[in-house]
């Protein structure tokens, strides 16, 4: 961003510049979800806080003051847009995570001292 916007820090501003959003008008044209998706499609990994910050910048309020109902709308719109993205090139899509438990035999126990103290050791 070439102009300082409320809620938009240096890292977020750099992301926005790199995806071609340089002014408040650019941001308003894209909308909060559109700008968020441009950042994601560029390969960055923004959190939902960026989505709320963009909405706050457009409505001139602190990102934490974005109403919960509006946050829900934004998240649903972003999730719908994310679902339409093609899978990453060169990498298979992620599969569900499963947990495998292996039954491991008990580790052998070692005695700290031999029971036979007179068996030819260095102290004999």
Image: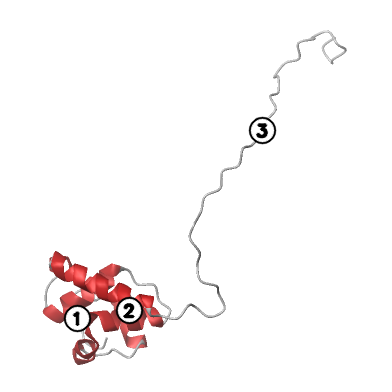
- At 26% across and 76% down in the image, what residue appears? 77
Secondary structure under tag 3 reads loop
Residue 6, quarter of picture? bottom left
The single residue placed furthest to the right in the displayed view is: 120
- Coordinates of residue 1 in the picture (x, y in percent): 27, 86
- Name the disc covering residue 5, or none: 1
Residue 15 makes an appearance in the image: no
Question: Vertically, is 27 above or below 51?
Answer: below
Classify residue 70 as left or right of residue 11. Answer: left
Residue 112, quarter of picture? top right
Secondary structure under tag 1 reads loop
- Name the disc covering residue 105, or none: 3
The answer to whether marks 2 and 1 mark residues whose Cβ atoms lie closer than 8 Å is no
Q: Distance between the residues labelled 2 and 3?
A: 49 Å
- The residue nearer to you, when weighing 36 against 75, is 75
Question: Vertically, is 121 above or below 12?
Answer: above
- At 17% across and 78% down in the image, what residue appears? 57
């Amino acid at each position: 961003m070439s102009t300082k916007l409320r809620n938009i820090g240096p890292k977020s501003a750099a992301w926005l510049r790199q995806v071609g959003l340089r002014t408040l008008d650019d941001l308003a044209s894209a909308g909060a979800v559109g700008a968020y998706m441009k950042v994601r499609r560029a390969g960055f990994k923004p959190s939902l806080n960026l989505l709320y910050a963009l909405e706050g910048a457009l409505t001139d309020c602190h990102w934490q003051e974005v109403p919960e109902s509006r946050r829900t709308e934004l998240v649903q719109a972003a999730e719908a847009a994310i679902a339409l993205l093609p899978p990453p090139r060169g990498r298979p899509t992620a599969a569900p995570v499963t947990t495998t438990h292996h039954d491991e035999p008990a580790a052998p126990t070692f005695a700290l001292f031999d029971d036979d103290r007179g068996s030819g050791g260095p102290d004999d």
